[in-house]
Image: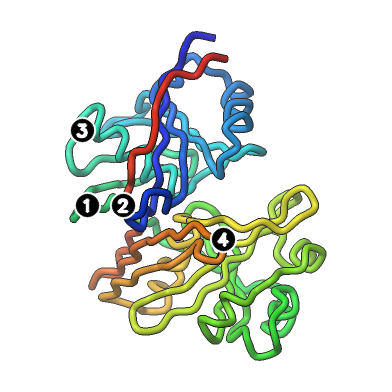
Amino acid sequence: MAALPYRVVNVFSDGSRFGGNPLAVFTDARKLADDEMQAIARQFNLAETVFVLPGEADGDAARLRIFTPATELPFAGHPVLGAAAVLAAQRSPGPAFTLRCNAGPIGVHEADGHWFLRVPTATQRPAALSASEAATMLGLAQGAVCDVPQWVNTGSEQLLIRASSRDAVLAARPDFARLIAGATLRPGRSIAYLWHAEAGVATVRFFYAQDGAVLEDIGTGSACANLGGYLALGGERGLDWRVEQGDVAGRPNRLRLCIDAAGRVSVGGRVRAMAGGDFHG
């Protein structure tokens, strides 16, 4: 395998040196097979690694392939935003352009030091899980979950659960067996996004089951996109929230969630360059 250039960036940076969600961006993946991309993502062992390919449709700046250490994803927010920042620095495609994921085209733009992605219209369906059952699944007291959880999809379907307070979000300790039983989208994909918002600030946590344990993602753009899509379907307009994630895990992430007057949703954050080099396979 020839040397492959890559960059490491922290997406959704809070401005501190090690805040945000780390991402590896391989800027030229034309010579890589699917299994090699998966193996490299496993080697880096970050939440996601993104591989950049030439755009295949008119108007696309690039095509993206997004991998966790275990599988490929159709869409994920922080890889799209991190790739956008890296490509803008290297190729200068302009302040706004389109990147194509497996889920479809995603418009991105830069404003006020943040990179934003435009969120497709959401679909939603109620979960087969009551608010009471969701609270038990999350290790919370009865009444800590407000509504019936909802499966929401703006590119990557996830289970959204609204908590009654910020303290409830921070106190959650999910049970592995109950997460598998109540929050499984398909075999190997059990996820729950817990959120509460007040005074323009949302506190959120994203849990997933892997290798017999419940793990926590520190900055989840796709889930924030789903939250925005869910709120837009409910009629929210003119919204600009700061979304706080990762604090419990000791890795603060800060996202922006915006819904304009027409109901268009965007998710963004700051991207901080951290490292770069060549990968020798």
Q: CA distance from mark 2 to mark 3?
A: 18 Å
Q: Is residue 245 above or below residue 54?
A: below
Q: Quick check: can you spot residue 159?
A: yes
Residue designated by label 4: 249
> Which residue is found at the position 77% from the left and 68% from the top?
175
Disc on the earlier residue, 4 or 2: 4
Percent across and percent down for residue 143 are: 65, 90
- Mark 3 burial class by Cα count in 10 Å: few <14, some 14-19, many 20+: few
Q: Which sits in the foreground, 35 or 9? A: 9
Disc on the earlier residue, 4 or 3: 3
- Mark 4 burial class by Cα count in 10 Å: few <14, some 14-19, many 20+: few
Percent across and percent down for residue 215 are: 67, 56
Q: Amino acid at mark 1?
A: Gly
**Residue 93, which numbered label?**
3
* Quadrant (top left, top right, bottom left, bottom right) of the C terminus: top right
Q: Amino acid at mark 4?
A: Ala
Q: CA distance from mark 1 to mark 4?
A: 25 Å
Q: Amino acid at mark 2?
A: Arg
Query: Would you say the residues marked 2 and 3 are in contact, meaning their CB atoms lie under 8 Å apart?
Result: no
Residue designated by label 2: 270
**Residue 113, which numbered label?**
1
* Quadrant (top left, top right, bottom left, bottom right) of the N terminus: top right
Disc on the earlier residue, 2 or 1: 1
Q: Which secondary structure, mark 3?
A: loop
The quadrant holding residue 200 is: bottom left
Disc on the earlier residue, 2 or 3: 3
Q: Amino acid at mark 3?
A: Pro
> Which residue is found at the position 47% from the left and 57% from the top?
154
Disc on the earlier residue, 3 or 1: 3
